[in-house]
Image (cartoon, helix red, strand yellow):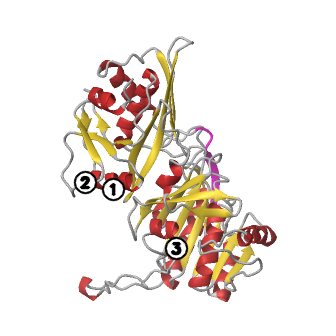
Amino acid sequence: MSKTRTEFVCQQCGYSSPRGLGRCPRCNAWNSMVEQVSAAPSRSESFSGPAASHPRRLREVDGSEESRLPLPIEEFSRVLGGGVVPGSIILVGGDPGIGKSTLMLQASWALAGKSGPVLYVSGEESERQMKMRAIRLAEGADPAGKGRIEPGQYPEDLFLVTETRLDAILQHVQSISPRILVVDSIQTAYLPELTSSAGSVSQVRECASRLQALAKSSGLAVFLIGHVTKEGVLAGPRVLEHIVDTVLYLEGDRFQSYRLLRAVKNRFGATSEVGVFEMRSTGMVEVRNPSEAFLAERASQSPGSAVAVIMEGTRPLLVELQGLTSPATYGTPRRTPNGVDLYRLLLISAVLTRRAGLRVSEEDIFVNVVGGLRVSEPAADLAMAVAIASAARDRPVSADLVLIGEIGLSGELRAVSQTTARLREASALGFRRAVVPRTVRPGDPPPKDIELVPCRTLREAIEKSLVAE
């Protein structure tokens, strides 16, 4: 005989309490405790039946690598580790309107043509709305990037359905037997036997657990699309990220065209890879050479512009950092970053004042990363500092120069990892000089067609980077 159980669960972190609280003790979020009523199984129901699993010796377990389903979208495939692993469950998160549904419809289209039946389940859009998006994709470029296709030539193995009840979704899976299942979104799915509403902690956790059991038992690859809260984390309990095999975030500014698909957890590949897309009217288009795209509109002779080489996984990217200084008009000078960390900007501003002899302590400082990217790597410190110095002195940075290095509190330049890979990417895009720390970490020899300008201090790097007056 089952009994009902009442508890209060935090919608932000999943913390549960037997009584209502105004603020969650774990994450300190106000008014996030929601009452949940669920049926607790009796003791006899919980421990009935023999165990279905059997322990095996390590040498008896098949250790061959699982064959992956090919994904023609190369940027997506790179982030996953080379394709979709059968039996895996993948969570795709991102801000509203960032392009999650568009990207997953394109991926479903590509997979249906290569790997077999794909079932796309939407709890937020009707089949007609999804068809309208598919028509827009068909009238533009092929989602795989291989050329144009005629409208009406849709994959035969791509199935669409609007459904939110999980038991109905499982029935559709049983009748169609797809190789790929896409649930858009997991917050709209619900189980009728649970009394809580769709999107609650218990519903999201239980639905994800059952889909995980389905994926592991049948070899079905499952994609879950998840909402993101205003704090930038996936909505629902944190246990959701532990249930899935891979967690992907689609990042970017809604007012910019570029999107970054980043893996923050991946049991079948590296977590440092990133895929770059451009949002167009015809969908998400792969950016095969993101460095060239980010620097396409750079004004090389303008003061306050510097080029940094950052690493996104194994891929080096060249990005433009812009700096601007202006006399403070309202008491305390402001530090306004866009795409960089505020505390990193404060640190570099202090080093410029105390160690490089640059009087910026009484000026407003603005720093912008072109393209809507977010740069958190310390290797961009030098480019940020030189961009600010260039704006303060009204002297442009040399057009053929890139800057690589971390800045210490005493004004010294520190070496960064994978310097050779960064220099190769800069050389391929036509840059002929690179300001680097004097103590470069050992590695492969740098390209011969790029001149290294070693510097020991930030003051020295600024003098060698700016064009002479």
Residue type marked 1 = Arg
* Residue 424: mark: 1
* Separation of marks 1 and 3 at Cα, in angstroms: 42 Å
Judge whether residue 207 is colored magenta.
no
* Separation of marks 3 and 2 at Cα, in angstroms: 47 Å
The percent position of residue 236, horizontal first and vertical second, equals: 58, 55
SS under mark 1? helix
Highlighted magenta segment, given as a residue range: 30-37
Q: In this rendering, is residue 137 above or below 179?
A: above
* Residue drawn at (56%, 12%) of the image: 329
Q: In this rendering, is residue 218 above or below 234?
A: below
Foreground residue among 93 and 42: 93
Residue bearing mark 2: 446
SS under mark 3? helix
Residue type marked 2 = Pro
Mark sitting earlier along the chain (1/3): 3
Whether residue 326 is visible to the viewer of this picture, yes or no, is yes
Q: Quadrant of the C terminus?
A: top left
Q: Quadrant of the N terminus?
A: bottom right
Residue bearing mark 3: 212
* Separation of marks 2 and 1 at Cα, in angstroms: 7 Å
Foreground residue among 90 and 33: 90
The image quadrant of residue 437 is: top left
